[in-house]
Structures are given as structure tokens and as C-alpha cells.
Amino acid sequence: MRPGPVFREEAMAVRRRMNVYFESDLLKQVALLAARQKVSQSAVIEMAVRSFLTGDIAGQQEAALIRRLDHLSRQMDGLDEDLSVMGETLALYVRAWMNAQLPLPPDAQEAAKARGRERYQNFLAILLRHLATGDRFLKERSRDIAAVREQRAVDANGAGESSVG
């Protein structure tokens, strides 16, 4: 007897079409992920379903990592916007401050210019020192505030002990 024909599985699985419905915000997230990963939206959904059905730990970890990175990216965008606002605010403040200065009589202008150059050079020296040491003004203020809070806590504990005893 002769054996019947042998059927081999194709190397590539046969794909069949399926219509599904998503909430619009979920569909937007799928589109964003597909664009970021440079794959089709169908591939994203297929990976998600496969991961869900198999309990793919690596896929879950990757999804969690992607969510975290997206969150960090949004935070960085927010910080970038905040930094732009602060820079613009400072520039407008300096411009307003300089425009608000009273005009000087001609005989006092040269002395004022010299004093201004001196102050500016001092400002640059302080700025460069802070940048070189990494000791920023806001860090200093944070340490000052922490020290004051710590001192208040010590004072409050000391006052509480003496009134109890």
C-alpha cells in the first residue's frame, strides 16, 4: 500500500480577518504604540492578545516598561514646558526691571555704567562658581529649608519634654 499524500504545515500561519470594536481612547493608544514601534496596529493587537492568552510575563513586563517610559516622556515634556515658561518669565522680568530704572543725569551715566559692568562681572563669577561646583541656588535653599524644619522639630521636641517634666 502506498501512503497518502503528506500535508505539511505552512511555515507561515494563515491569517483570517476579524472585526473588533474598541473605545476611541484605546484605539488612539494602539495607534501611538504602533507608530512608536513602527509596526501595524494589527500587529500590536495581535501581540497584546497573544500575550494575554499565554500569560506572557516578558510581554507584561515590556508593556509595563513601555507605560513607565511613556509616563516619563510626558513628565519630561511637562518639565521642558515649565522650563520654557520660567526662562520667558525671567527674561520679561529683567526687561521690565531694566526699563523701570530711572534715567540718570549725563554726568552720572559713566559711573553707573562702570558699576553695572562690575556687578555683571560679579554675577558671572558667582554663576560660574555655582555651575562648576554643581551647587545650585535652589539646592542651597532646599538645604536651608530642611535645616530650619529640623531645628523647629528639635525645638518643638525640647519644649514638649520640658513642659512634661
Image (tube, rainbow, N blue to C red):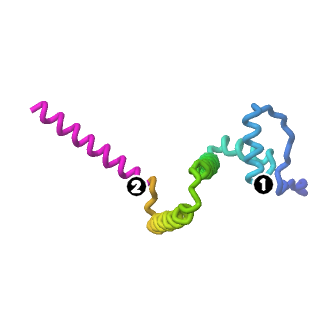
**Foreground of the two, 8 or 164:** 164
Which percent across, then down, holds residue 16? 86, 42
Q: Nearer the viewer, residue 162 or 68?
A: 162
| Magenta span contains residue 47 | no
Q: Secondary structure at mark 2?
A: helix
- Is residue 158 part of the magenta span, yes or no? yes
Decide if residue 33 is in sight here. yes
Task: Name the amino acid, label 1.
Answer: Lys
Q: Residue 99 placed where, x, y %?
A: 62, 50
Number of the front mark, 2 or 1? 2
Answer whether residue 80 is visible to the viewer in this image.
no
Mark identifier at residue 38: 1
In the displayed structure image, the side of residue 67 where residue 21 appears, left or right:
right
Location of the C terminus by quadrant is top left
What residue is at 57 percent from the left and 50 percent from the top? 102
Q: Is 52 placed left or right of 107 in the picture?
A: right
* Separation of residues labelled 2 and 1 (CA atoms): 45 Å
Q: Which one is in front, 22 or 35?
A: 35
Q: Label the magenta part by its dominant secondary structure.
A: helix
Mark 2 vs 1, N-terminal side: 1
Is residue 137 shown left or right of residue 71?
A: left
Q: Residues within 10 Å of mark 2 (few under 14, many from 20)?
A: few
Name the residue type under label 2: Glu
Q: Is residue 124 above or below residue 93?
A: below
Which element type, helix, strand or loop, lies under badge 1?
loop
126 or 137, nearer to the observer: 126
| Crowdedness near tag 1: few (<14), some (14–19) or many (≥20) residues, C-alpha within 10 Å | few
- For label 2, the residue is 140
**Magenta span of residues:** 139-165
Q: Is residue 90 above or below residue 114?
A: above
Q: Name which residue lies at 57% across and 57% down.
A: 105
Tell me which residue sits at (79%, 45%) in the image.
41
